[in-house]
Image: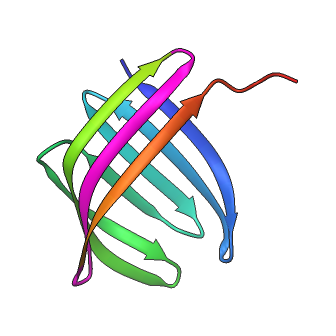
Amino acid sequence: ETVSVSYKTSTEGGTVSTAYRLFDNSLSVTRSGAINSVMVFKAGETHSSVYEIPPFKFDMTVTAKRLDHALSESGGKIDLLYEMNVGEAIKLCKMKISICEESKV
């Protein structure tokens, strides 16, 4: 089963479109616009890509330490612990995503 969620945000550099896709116990996060990146998370695996904040580009790797999720048709949560290496900077990161059904007004 594949679950996809997307949204747009405004930043100092412009608009960023973000799409999350959960599939085969993996999570992909794709950003485009003022920030461009593709990150793929699967526990114990490392993914290499480019992180771009125009006009700058950086080599990046992400290694998922833990990926837990509990999703249903009405929403749920994704809990991710990962190590990010951008250039020479290494950082341990947490990402918690809550997804809820859009209310209809």
Which portion, as a residue range, is magenta? 73-89
**Toward which corner of the image does residue 9 lie, by quadrant?**
bottom right
Give residue 24's position: percent from left, percent from top. Answer: 25, 27
Q: Quadrant of the N terminus?
A: top left
Q: Residue furthest right?
A: 105
The front one of 77 and 32 is 77
Q: Quadrant of the C terminus?
A: top right
The front one of 86 and 93 is 93
Residue drawn at x 26%, y 46% as measured from the top left: 41
Give residue 90's position: percent from left, percent from top. Answer: 22, 75
Does residue 4 lie above or below 82 as drawn? above
Residue drawn at x 11%, y 47% as measured from the top left: 44
Residue drawn at x 22%, y 84% as measured from the top left: 88
Name the dominant secondary structure of the magenta segment. Answer: strand
Give residue 27's position: percent from left, percent from top. Answer: 33, 40
Q: Is residue 81 magenta?
A: yes
In this figure, which colouring scheme has been used for the structure?
rainbow
